[in-house]
Each structure stands twice: as C-alpha cells, then as structure tokens.
Image (tube, rainbow, N blue to C red):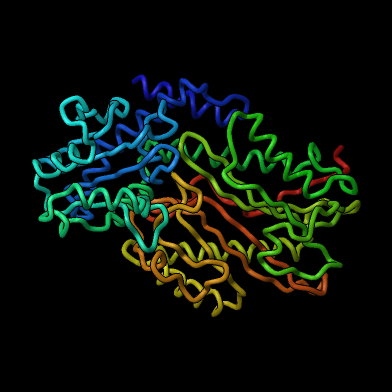
Amino acid sequence: MRYLLGFILCMLTLSAHTQILSEKDRASVRDEILAERFNKLLPVLMDRAEIDMWVIISREYNEDPVMKTMLPSTWLNARRRTMLVFFRKGDSIEKLAVARYDIGDAIKSTWDKEKQPNQWKALADIISSRNPEKIGINISENYGLADGLVKTDYEELLKSLPQEYHSRLISAEDLAVGWIETRTLKEMLLFSSLVELTHEVIQEAFSTQVIEPGVTTTDDVVWWLRQKVTDLGLETWFHPTVDIQRSNEQLVDHITAFSNENGSDIILKGDLLHCDFGISYLGLNTDCQQMAYILQNTETEAPQFLQKALAKGNRLQDILTENFKTGRTGNEILAASLEKAKAEGLKPSIYTHPLGLYGHSAGPTIGMWDQQGGVPGTGDYPLYEDTAYAIELNTEVNIPEWDKDIRIMLEEAGFWGKEGFRYVNKRQTSLILIDPSAE
C-alpha cells in the first residue's frame, strides 16, 4: 500500500508537469522496484540463461554497467571493491555481498575481514561452499553493457578460485542482457508517465512560448530543452538535437542532420522542424523524435504534402512493429521490415534499439543507420517479451512542391509483451503546428 500510494503520487506529479518526486520519495520508489526485480525477475532470468551462480565485481568509479543498475538509491557508486554473488537456491535467490557493507536491504554482507582479511579468498570460499555448475561472469564480445568485468578483476578471480572451477566460468551475456532489457509492470507504469512528460516538453519546445520565427535558432531550442529538464529536477542522457528541412535547401545526409554540423539555423515560417530528445528519471530513460511545422501567414494547417509524408513515416512504423515476434532476432525483424517497406514503394532506414535502464540499451538491435544489412552480434539476439524499444527510423519522401526529398524521422517508445506490441504512450500521427499568428 505504501508503494501504491507513492506510485500514484508519482503518476500524478509527472502528468501534471509541475512537480517531480523529492529525492527521498524517488529513493523509496527505486528501492521497491529493485527489490521486486531481485525477488521475482532475477530467478526467472537465471533459469532462462541456465546459470546457477552470477558473480559481479566492480571497483568504485569503475562500475560494471549491470552493477550500476543493482545499487540501492543511497549508493551512487560502488564502494572500494564490491563483489555481488547471486546463487539460485531452491525456489529463491541467495543474494550475497563480499564487501564491508550491506548493499541496501536486499543484499547482505557476508565478508568478515577480521576473520578472513583476503577478500578474494572470501569470494572463493563462497563459491566453493556452494559448488555451482555454471558461474556467470560479465564478459561479452557483443554488448558493452554485459562486459563489465575488467581485466584486473578477472585475473584476480582466476588466481583465487580453485582450478576445478575455472572451466565452470561462462559468459553471463544472456543473463546480463535479460536483466537490463526486461521491464516489470511497475516500471512500465512509471515509464508511461515519463514518456508522456517527454512528449509534453517537446510540445512546449515546439510552440510560440519558445520559438519566434526569424529570431529563435535551433540551438536556442536545444538549450531550452536542456534547461527545462534541469529546471524540472531531471537529467537528459544525451544532448538534444533540433534541425530544419525547408524548400530552398537540399537534404543533408543522415548523420549531419543529427549532429547539428550545419551549426545553428534561424527558424523561419514554413520550416519543417525535427528534434531528438530524451529524459532520465528513476533509473529509466526515454528517447523520442518528433516533427513540427511553422505555419506561414495564410496557413491554418500543414501542407497536405507534408501530412502525407508523415503518414508514410507512420506506415514504416507499422511495418516494423508488425514484424515483431517473440524469438525472432533483430536482424530477422530488420530484413523482413525493409523488404516489405520497399515493396510498398517506401525509402526506409530502420535503426531501432532497446530502451529502459539505459538509453541505447541491451537487447536485439534492429538495424543501425549505417548498417541496414544487419548488425552482427547484437542483431542476432532474439526478441523477448516484457521489453521496451525506441522505434527509431526514417523514410525519405520526394516533395515535388519543394523540388527535393525530405526525411521523416520518428522515434517513439514501444513495448513488446504477451499481448503483442503497443506504444508506451501513443505516437505522433500529425505534425505539431506552431502558429506565430496566435501570439
């Protein structure tokens, strides 16, 4: 009940766009979500990965990315050298810390330095006494987020561990990715509100409250977004971008548009605007791209050719998400989607990625902007249920009225679960209109 009341408060404050939870209340929410993940999610993931012991080792300020997601709210970093051991025991998980301190309420310290001064020997004793068949460690060729065991700690682990256990050490890649990518119901409820807030901030950025045509620059809007998030008491996990497409300028290449290499442009009436923007809050991250149009003096809506172009972007989204199927790899989803889109006359580019505990998170990569033929390794990972994605893509559309091609660039948070695909909090199906005459 305490969690539920706090969670309802969180939902209300987020959607009201006026107040964010206090640091103390955020801590309560994060710790309760983490406890549920340890107690209910971790056993399922360990069984799926067929690993009966998971060992995670980090030193302060050089944390394993997985460990970062396991630290309680009052731990902003690991302390000294922190070792976590998760052992599948019966119907539950034994959660141990070979450290001088308890790791919050969930993980108790089992190391008495006065009795055993050598921390590595204490870890080896824990492993030997439980005699696991498979010991997962965070080494991974494909995922940086699952490759957190550094060379020094790996070598020390081998030196301290009896020889008979060396052959039992295996990559915990599937387990680490599963931990990072899988969302609980409570997380998704919170995530929905965070995505809504992201949309609200974009709506405000793309309005006459922020933009005055002929005066405001794209860089002004970028820094407004950064400042807005800071003023809300939150953070962005990447520097936002805002770019322009207009009738008298040729379409630039994809990476230039996203990196603002053209510098800061003055926004004018008749411009087609695009932003890329994301927020971090309570351990979750959003990633959203939407488009807006600056009405000219005689206009009350965006030109029909731009509205039809956006519809083609929405169609590409539909084609992609219709190809989602549990067990299908990212590369398989990509190939099927591109084939279908091209057969319908679209000029697609798909670069969809997992989303959640990290922005560019772990899970099946469904294309990269410069790898439309598939992504070795991360693209070969299968789609699992209860996972979230940034449905990120673009399609080029020829606009005879402008005598050029434009690029419809969209990105929305989506969820794949037992009932199929859904957008976390709707998606953009019409251009945001900025009407200078309304001021």
The furthest residue to the bottom: 343
194 sits to left or right of 365 = right
199 sits to left or right of 103 = right
Q: Residue 60 location in percent, x, y?
A: 41, 37
Q: Residue at x 36, y 51 (%)?
A: 150
Quadrant for the C terminus, please.
top right
Judging depth in this view, the residue of 330 and 404 nearest the camera is 330
Image mark count: 0
Q: Residue at x 70, y 55 (%)?
A: 274
Quadrant for the N terminus, please.
top left
Q: Residue 295 location in percent, x, y?
A: 83, 52
Residue 419 showing in the rendered view: no
358 sits to left or right of 179 = right
Judging depth in this view, the residue of 84 and 344 nearest the camera is 84
Above or below, comparing residue 273 to residue 375 in the picture: above
Judging depth in this view, the residue of 85 and 377 nearest the camera is 85
Indicate the quadrant where residue 354 lies.
bottom left
Q: Residue at x 22, y 28 (%)?
A: 113
Q: Residue 250 location in percent, x, y?
A: 80, 70
Residue 155 showing in the rendered view: yes
216 sits to left or right of 280 = right
Indicate the quadrant where residue 39 lies.
top left
